[in-house]
Image (spheres, rainbow, N blue to C red):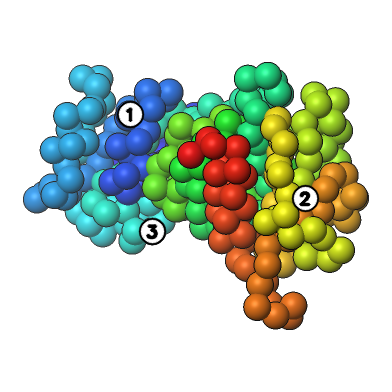
Amino acid sequence: MEKQQGMELVFGIHPIIELLNAKRRKIYTIYTTKPEPKAWPKILKLLPKYTKIEFISKEKLSKLADSTDHQGVVALASPFIIRKKFFNPEKEKFLLMLDSIQDPRNLGAILRSAHCTGVNGVIVTERNSTFLTPTAIKSSAGLVEHLEIYFAPNAKSAVDELKKAGYTIYVSNLENSKSALDVDFTLPCCVIIGNEGEGVSPSILKSGQSIKLPQVTADISYNASVAAGILLFLISTKNKII
């Protein structure tokens, strides 16, 4: 019952269902309990014939997942498919860039909002960032399985590629910024969300239109995932994506 090389753990009802619905990677083994979780019939209906099913104790599931938040199901799957080719502004008009997001739960929550608002692709900077851990996938409710994710070495190289491709860039930043309510958000575009504590990297602060969300007082700020969700919703509705 050990994780095998070349496989990734996925846990939780919705993440496993979305992984199966997306049909982009395989589930080789799925572990569950006796009696099975209430949602087990939904998973069983989607499982390919080649998937091995093993029944183990709840305690062993928690140990395997390194979490008690597994909802009674843990799967061994093929690795998440990372996009290798950069985005095309004619096809992928609405992008999100995440600069040094370090909390996997924040990452997952942002990716969930990205899917819900019609984002065509997500750029994640590798430097000082969390990866797509099982916790991040669980926090996205598995919706990351439907997204195109591209990893850039750092924020500067990502911005260079965005400019070369012809995207309009919007940088989320509290200082010297225009209210997002007053911005038209021209497509194709990419909105950049920065680190939970320090915000966007100083090297790219002036790489595009600086925007901020209105708030009651200047000495507070939205959580990174909340700010991302609001901005993505705003851009999506202004462009009639949703």
Going from N to C along the chain, the mark reached first, 1 or 2, is 1
Q: Position of residue 114 (x, y in %)?
A: 54, 43
Would you say 119 lies left or right of 162 here? left
Which residue is found at the position 27% from the left and 54% from the top? 71
**Distance from Cα at disc 2 to Cα at disc 3:** 35 Å
Dot 3, crowdedness within 10 Å: few (<14), some or many (≥20)? Answer: some
Marks 2/3 in contact by CB < 8 Å: the verdict is no
Disc 1 and disc 2 in contact, CB within 8 angstroms: no
Q: In this view, does 185 lie above or below 19?
A: below
Q: Is mark 2 on a helix, strand or loop?
A: strand
Q: Separation of disc 1 and disc 2 at Cα?
A: 33 Å
Q: Is residue 190 above or below residue 179?
A: above
Q: Position of residue 139 (x, y in %)?
A: 44, 53
The label nearer to you, 1 versus 2, is 2
Residue at mark 3: 67
Residue shown at the point (42%, 25%) measured from the top left: 25
Q: Is residue 23 left or right of residue 35?
A: right
- Mark 3 is on which residue type? Ser
Q: Which residue occupies the foreground of this view, 47 or 167? A: 167
Q: Residue furthest left?
A: 35
Secondary structure at badge 3 equals: loop
Tell me the residue that label 1 is attached to: 21
Q: Which residue position is annotated with label 2? A: 171
Which of the two discs, 3 and 1, labels the residue nearer the N terminus? 1
Left/right placement of residue 7 relative to residue 56 reads right
Marks 3 and 1, how far apart at CA: 24 Å
The quadrant of the rendering that contains the N terminus is top left
Q: What element carries label 1?
A: helix
Q: Which amino acid does label 2 sit on?
A: Val
